[in-house]
Amino acid sequence: MTHIIFNTSCYKEEVNPSLIDNLICFWNFKENPGQDRISVSDYPYCLKEGNGMIARATEGVFGNHSAIIKEGQWFYIPRAECPALNIFGKNTEITIAAWIKREQKSYDQCEAIAGIWNETDLKRQYCLFLNLGIWDSKDQVCGHISGFGGPTPGYKYCMDAAIGNTKVPYGEWVCVGMTYNGSEINAYYNGKLDYREKLNPYPYDVGIFDSGSSGGDFTVGAVHRFNEMGNFFVGQIGGLAVYNRALDEKEMLYLANNIKE
C-alpha cells in the first residue's frame, strides 16, 4: 500500500488531490550507510550504493536525514529489478522531482540527478540533470528526453532538453523537477515552471526511446558514459519521486511546498 508522503489535506478544489496517483517510487533516504534505500511506495525498489557506502546526514526534507553523495558516488537499480521505471514510447509521460542540496565539485561538468540514461551504449531514455551545458546553459535545471537513444540527428550529442533560467545554488535545499507529456518537456525549479524562451517548455513529440532488455540501469547521482560512470552530482538528496504521468504546474508547485515527515 502506498504511503501518504505528501500533505494532501489542504488542497484547494482546483488542484488534483491525488499526488499519490501514478506514483511509481518515492525515496526519503532515511536509511543508514551500507543499506539499500527502499522506495516507500507500491514499488519498493531498492537503490544500491555505487562506489562505497554513502553517508547519511542528520538533516533533511522528509524527516531528519538525507543521503550525502560524495564525488564519484551514486545510487543505482539494475534494470531487471525496476521494470516500472522503464518508461518508453511515443505518447508516454513521466515526472521526476528531487529535493537536493547541491555542493561544489572539483570540475565543471553536467550533473545527473536521476533517470535511465546510458550514453555508452546509446540507450538514453530520460534523466533530470543540472548544469547540462548545451544551448548556452549553465547551472540550471534540465529535463532530458531522448527518442533516439543516441545523439539528436545532426548533432554530436543529445540536444533535446528543457532548460530553465534560474541558477541552482550551492548549499541550499531546493526542489528540482521535470515533466514530459508526450509533446513537450518542462523543467521546474522549486515547483514553478522556470520559463526560458524556446527552451522551457521544450516542444518534443518524438517520445522516449525503447532501450529493450539491455538498456541502462536506473541511476541517481551519475550516468554511464564513455564506458564508466560520470556526470556526477555532489551534495545531499533528501527525497526523490518518479511518476508515470506528467504532473501539471499546480501539482508541481504543491509537491514542492507541501510535504510532511
Image (cartoon, rainbow, N blue to C red):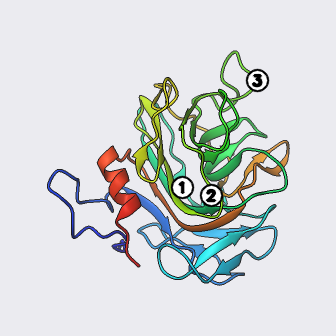
Estimate the spatial distance between the alpha carbons at disc 2 and disc 3, rounded to whole Å. 30 Å
Which is nearer the N-term, disc 1 or disc 3? 1
At 47% from the left and 75% from the top, the residue drawn is 62
What x and y, as percent, mark residue 44?
Answer: 50, 71
Extreme residue in the top direction: 154
All told, the count of numbered labels is: 3
The residue type indicated by label 3 comes to Lys
List the residue tagged with mark 3. Answer: 156
List the residue tagged with mark 2. Answer: 80
At 41% from the left and 79% from the top, the residue drawn is 261
- Disc 2 or disc 3, which is closer to the eye? 3
Which element carries disc 3, helix, strand or loop?
A: loop
Q: Is residue 169 visible?
A: yes
The residue type indicated by label 2 comes to Ala
At 64% from the left and 64% from the top, the residue drawn is 171
Looking at the image, is 65 positioned above or below residue 116?
Answer: below
- Residue 54's image quarter? bottom right
What x and y, as percent, mark residue 47?
Answer: 62, 68
Badge 2: residue crowd in 10 Å (few <14, some 14–19, many ≥20) = some
Estimate the spatial distance between the alpha carbons at disc 1 and disc 2, rounded to whole Å. 6 Å
Badge 1: residue crowd in 10 Å (few <14, some 14–19, many ≥20) = few
Dot label at residue 83? 1
Q: From the viewer's perspective, is 243 left or right of 51? A: left
